[in-house]
Amino acid sequence: MIFVALDVDDLVIASNNNELLKSIKNALSERFDMTDLGRLKYFLGIEIEQDESTGSVSMRQTKFATDILKKFSMENSNSVKNPQDPGLKLIKAMCEGGCKHEETMINVPNRNAVGCLIYLMVGTRPDLAAAVGVLSQFATDPCPTRWQALKRLQGYSDADWAGDIYSTQYKWLRVYDERWMHKLKKQETTHEAIWLKTFLCELGEIRDEDPVKIFEDNQGSIALAKNPEFHKRTKHIDIRYHFVHEKVEGGQVTLQYCSTKDMKADMMTKPITEAQFDFLCKMLGIKPPSTAESSGSVVEEAPRHTD
């Protein structure tokens, strides 16, 4: 088995067969001008460290995180232990009808700062997902309260229904207890999970007959997916959400209850307390900045799979 990841002129090749790996590199070298940089240590701004003794891969963006702090003059800011203040609600109504602070905020690099944090989140910092998800909604509509929330998030370097109409779901897809993908989206978890299963089946990693297991902390949702009776309490549900029921009924998806306290993805959908945030970070194998090598870096480890 060999895996190839390509981004413009940057190429990563991985295989469990050294001879196959060498033959692929030789074949590419004969056709293209390329430089073999050896064992992967840096890719697309992400620092990568492989530990063969533990079978783990650590990823961090220390330099990028530090550069963000310097860019926005936050390098000497006080650190905080969680990315969001659980007591602060950022909603659209804050500045409806024209914000009185519009003139004072016109030169604030709000959109630029949000963009930097999105890149950091997508790369190695899923713990920033909930805060970045909220702040990105106001990237072009800053106000002092939102800017302070964004600065708090820089210092740190299932959503409730009160703010917006659609529930936010955070997908943390795992294979053999290794983190494959994290993604903050609106209501497409099952579609994504089934797509990933199909992809892994093509790679020979899992069997086609194995169902996708989805953990859910809402027992009502589980009951509805198993028996979607159409009555006045559920008729507001869009027909596309019955896609889940079809997959459950067909044996392609199984739903399993997980308490909110132990729901690993919960930290990525809404503000939570510092204690719960720290607990979930440890469950996900994410080391907070206070224990990482330098300020603003977080290490995400993928434990070795044992049969």
Image (spheres, rainbow, N blue to C red):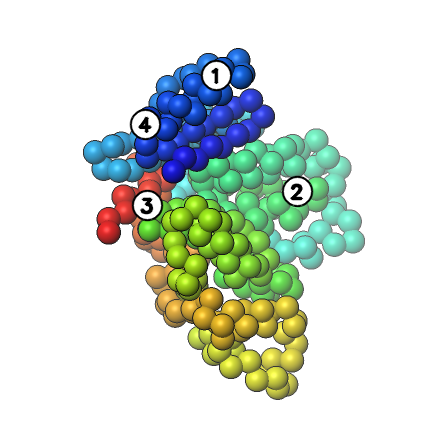
Q: Residue at x 47, y 66 (%)?
A: 252
Residue, disc 4: 18
> Is residue 171 among the parts visible in the rendering?
no
Q: Residues within 10 Å of mark 1 (few under 14, many from 20)?
A: few
Q: Give residue 29's mark.
A: 1
Residue, disc 3: 285
Q: Residues within 10 Å of mark 4 (few under 14, many from 20)?
A: few
Q: Amino acid at mark 3?
A: Gly
Among numbered discs 2 and 4, the one appearing first in the sequence: 4
Report the mark closest to the observer, 4 or 3: 4
Q: CA distance from mark 2 to mark 3?
A: 30 Å
Answer with left or right where residue 124 lies relative to residue 140: left
Q: Amino acid at mark 1?
A: Ser
Nearest the eye: 284 or 294: 284
Q: Amino acid at mark 2?
A: Ala
Q: Residue at x 37, y 67 (%)?
A: 258
Residue, disc 2: 139
Among numbered discs 4 and 1, the one appearing first in the sequence: 4
**Secondary element type, mark 2:** loop
**Secondary element type, mark 4:** helix
**Secondary element type, mark 1:** helix
Among numbered discs 2 and 3, the one appearing first in the sequence: 2
Figure quadrant of residue 93: bottom right
